[in-house]
Image (cartoon, rainbow, N blue to C red):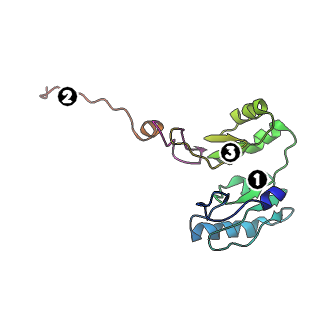
Amino acid sequence: MNGVKQLKVGNPAEPDTVIGPIINQSQLDGLIQKIESSQDGNVKLLYGGKADGLLLPPHVFSPVDGSHQLCQEETFGPLVPVTVAENEDHALQLANDTHHGLSSAVFTENMARGLNFARGIYAGMTHINDITVDDQPLAPFGGEKNSGIGRFNGDYIMEEFTRAHWITWQGTGQ
């Protein structure tokens, strides 16, 4: 938790800010509702805090079963479910056992092992030892399953939103 406590929440224009504001009040209200409804049964809030305007500190929950809403819904906010995997195969199963697949992250000290694991994740993007929010202008940006409508950026945008259609014209009708 010490690392989470060190994350600066604030103005994204400031270089040391890690967590910026939630996009709008409606999204913040939905996140607050998820925070309140997620603390049920065995799930405990390990770290959190109150919103300040549209700034919401990270909220860490544990233990969270893979079928819990925090694992099955895209939150688009700093809500972190901690799920315990029995082994690497089980971890990959948990990562893929969702209807969404926009972005994922793998944290490892062994790059070969991390890359092998990342190849098994069914998501549009996987970042190794980095956060799930990253965008490069020429890299394809988009998700799998129910996340997104294709790939953006670079030449991918043309392929996603156009289709080849050959039309000929003989001049006069026959």
The mark that comes first in sequence, 2 or 3, is 3
Mark sitting on residue 29: none
In this view of the protein, which residue sits in the foreground, 166 or 106?
Answer: 106
Q: Is mark 2 on a helix, strand or loop?
A: loop
Using a 10 Å C-alpha cutoff, classify the residue at mark 2 as few (fewer than 14 neighbours), some (14 to 19) or many (20 or more): few
Q: Main secondary structure of the magenta part?
A: loop
- The question of residue 143 being in magenta is answered with yes
Horizontal and vertical percent position of residue 133: 63, 50
Which class describes the residues within 10 Å of circle 3: few (<14), some (14-19), or many (20+)? many
* Image: magenta residue range: 139-155
> Which of the two discs, 2 and 1, labels the residue nearer the N terminus?
1
Q: In which quarter of the image is the N terminus?
A: bottom right
Q: Is residue 134 left or right of residue 4?
A: left
Indicate the position of residue 33 as horizontal and vertical percent values. 69, 69
Q: Name the residue under label 1.
A: 67
| Residue name at image x 88 percent, y 42 percent | 86
What is the quadrant of the C terminus in the image? top left
The residue identified by callout 3 is 104
Give the mark nearer the N terminus: 1 vs 3: 1
In the picture, measured across the screen, residue 30 lies left or right of residue 37, that is left
How far apart are the alpha carbons under marks 1 and 3? 17 Å
Amino acid tagged 1: Ser
Q: In this view, does 2 lie above or below 158?
A: below
Q: Label 2 is placed on what type of residue?
A: Trp
Specify the amino acid type for callout 3: Ser
SS assignment at label 3? strand
Image quarter of residue 35 = bottom right
Instruction: Determine the residue located farthest toward the left in the rendered image.
Output: 172
Residue beneath the point at 13% across and 28% down: 171
Residue 169: assigned label: 2
Residue at 57% from the left image edge and 64% from the top image edge: 23
